[in-house]
Amino acid sequence: MEVSLSVIGEKGSINIGGEYMNKLNYQSIDQYRLEVAGDGNANDYGFYKGSMSNHDKIYANLVRR
């Protein structure tokens, strides 16, 4: 299954997605370029792959930008 999130704003828009929301699919932002950090692999806990309980940190980081 795949998930995506689009953010459309006054000065640009982005779309992130992928099975673990680890891919930057699209960006168009006035005078700014997002860089993707890391290798894009999800955290692997053996029984689960993904960010588990870290969603609040991801959303907080997104709001700060």
Image (tube, helix red, strand yellow):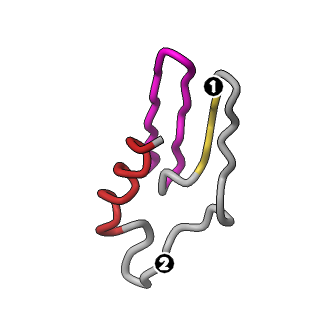
Residue 54 or residue 46, whichever sits in front: 54
Residue 40 at x, y = what percent? 63, 61
The kind of residue tagged 2 is Asp
Mark 1 highlights which residue?
Answer: 29
Magenta-tinted stretch: 1-19
- Say whether residue 8 is magenta: yes
Pointer 2: residues within 10 angstroms few (<14), some, or many (20+)? few
Q: Give the residue at the far bottom of this rendering.
A: 46
Residue at horizontal 38%, vertical 41%?
63
User: Measured along the vertical axis of the image, is residue 37 above or below residue 43?
Assistant: above
The kind of residue tagged 1 is Ile
User: Measured along the vertical axis of the image, is residue 57 above or below residue 25?
Assistant: below
Q: Are marks 1 and 2 in contact (CB under 8 Å)?
A: no
Q: Mark on residue 44? A: 2
Residue 50 at x, y = what percent? 43, 67
Q: Secondary structure at mark 1?
A: strand
Left or right? Give the position of 53 relative to 10: left
Give the mark nearer the N terminus: 1 vs 2: 1
- Say whether residue 7 is magenta: yes
Pointer 1: residues within 10 angstroms few (<14), some, or many (20+)? some
Indicate the quadrant where residue 47 lies: bottom left
Q: Secondary structure at mark 2?
A: loop
Between circles 1 and 2, the one closer to the viewer is 1
Left or right? Give the position of 22 relative to 58: right
Residue 48 or residue 12, whichever sits in front: 12
Residue at horizontal 34%, vertical 65%?
54
Left or right? Give the position of 19 relative to 48: right
Residue 13 at x, y = what percent? 54, 24
Residue at horizontal 38%, vertical 75%?
48
Q: Mark on residue 2? A: none
Residue at horizontal 53%, vertical 41%?
16
